[in-house]
Image (cartoon, rainbow, N blue to C red):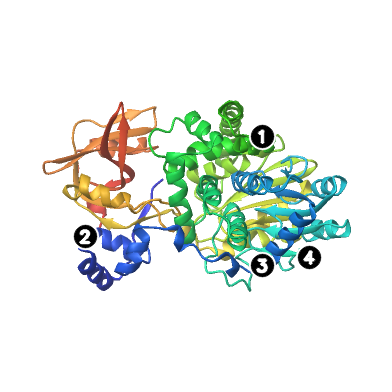
Amino acid sequence: MDYRWEWEPVDENRVVALQRELGIHPVFCRLLVQRGVPDFESARRFFRPELTHLHPPLAMKGMAEALDRLDLALSRGERILVYGDYDVDGTTAVALVYRFLRRRHEAVEYYIPDRDSEGYGLSEAGVRYAAATGVGLILTLDCGIKAVDRIAEARALGMDVIVADHHLPGAELPDAVAILDPKQADCGYPFKELCGCGVGFKLLQGFVERHGLPTAELYEGLDLVAVSIAADIVPVTGENRVLLHHGLQLLAKAPRPGLRALLRQAKVVGPPTIRDLVFGLAPRINAAGRMGHARDAVAMLLAETEDPARDGADELQSRNDHRKQEDQDTTREALAILMAWADREERFSTVVFAEHWHKGVIGIVASRLIEKHYRPTIVLTASNGQAVGSARSVAGLDIHDAISACSDLLDRFGGHAFAAGLSMPLANVPIFRERFEAAVRERIPFDLLTPRLRIDAELTLPDVKDKFFAILKQFEPFGPGNLAPVFASRALQTQGAPRVLKDEHLKVQVRSGDVRFDGIAFGQVGSLGLCSSGKPLALAYHVEENRWNGQVSLQLHIKSIKRSEEIEA
């Protein structure tokens, strides 16, 4: 993409004051202030996230009521159904809570809805199953906040429901015995951005604290919480940063057998990073529900020994291979539809539909289309006589809000600002496409449909040394709200001829004076001529480690290449 570079603003006076306090490279002080870390004490907490920094569970609205009802179920010997969604967040949440409860209570089982026949959230089939099997308490994880009708049905059938969700509530809350969702309007919980597995973790933390139990068992679940935080793309700030930090440490030292098997399948070498979780583990776990049934992912995550864990991971690998092929085929077809539109450059949105596309990959394809054509995007397919879709947004547009403006055309929708799901009658697809286009036009100026690349700070190549990188690594784990810093350097010369890798990537070496660095520019073969011109370059890049054949070196992960003269001093 041809990014428009924008420099991340910062209060220069705060940077200077923090540099006096910390005595480290001014660039790091700039990064800290940009991340809302303005003084020594907040920097200490940022660089040393401790589990003692977690907020008290009882600060979450509904926690006391949820714990009361859970205690009652355990004391009565009631049958408990742990119900979760079919994605990574839902399956990890179910594995986390089910395992904890199963150690204390025999009459507990878990339920994951079938993606194709039941769809997202608490389903009618799930409620009927619970009633037929004598369940007294349903605990929903990563879903339930909008399940007003289904929870009313459960109550009518004599069952109570605890909702543990993190999605935005609707206008009406369900009639649950307790609702745990920090996004409730009147919930005073200090951190609003937990994932679904994170809310489940807080419920267990509340149980442990109420009963004076050792925390060791609770913290055994941090590997699952880390995978969920990474996969669900929630902000890596506040409580999420603490949970992710310690979850990554657990994954490096002693992950559960299922996750250890997945790390091997993903060929992760060394301590896992958030990137390994997002691109290595998450697609494999998600493939269970996309190309089969997600309960298989839960079974793999619950495996206590190596053999069933390995067998489960092998099955997920096979499904992920199938998913990749469907992904590639659907992306190719969707791009062909998009490129055939004469007015595609004038449109503010992309909505594409084909009846035969696999429901399990349409969210991935929506993201792929945005990489090629930067617009809020919805990909629709046919399922059970309905058009069902996945939506992905761009910076500056709340896609859930834009979809809600078309709610009269929809049967169901839900999600958040950056991603959503929806369903509608097949006949409504053409009018929905135009209504959604109008809703997007009202909510975002056209100039925001050119992707921005936010530059955190300018560096010279001599700044980038091993000591520099050692401090930079302490800013991890990276993710939304704490993105990997993008640096910029100007007046760089290429050294030798750039190399083209796999017909789409560029490998270049750049120098500033006597300092040289290798750089990799994924998907930027279109910049080959610029890199071969001999003219001074400006690069925007991440600094990262390159591990190859047992050797470790620093390299530039290049995000954008421009002529040096294009970038203002």
What residue appears at the point 45 percent right and 63 percent down from the top-left corner?
53
Residue 540 located left or right of residue 164: left
Report whether residue 474 is seen: yes
**Picture quadrant where residue 43 is located:** bottom left
Asked if marks 3 and 2 touch (Cβ < 8 Å), the reply is no
Q: Give the residue at mark 4.
A: 175
For label 1, the residue is 296
Q: Is residue 103 above or below residue 139?
A: above
Query: Which one is earlier in the sequence, the residue at label 1 or at label 3?
Result: 3
Total labels drawn: 4
| Of the image marks 4 and 3, the number of the one nearer the N terminus | 3
Q: Earlier in the sequence, mark 4 or mark 2?
A: 2
**Residue 291 vs residue 336, the one in the foreground:** 291
Q: Residue at x 42, y 40 (%)?
A: 252
In the rendered structure, find residue 64 and report the number of the disc placed on it. 3
Answer left or right for 96 relative to 179: left
Point out the tag, 1 or 4, that comes first from the N-terminus.
4
Residue type at mark 3 is Ala
**C-alpha span from label 1 to label 4:** 31 Å
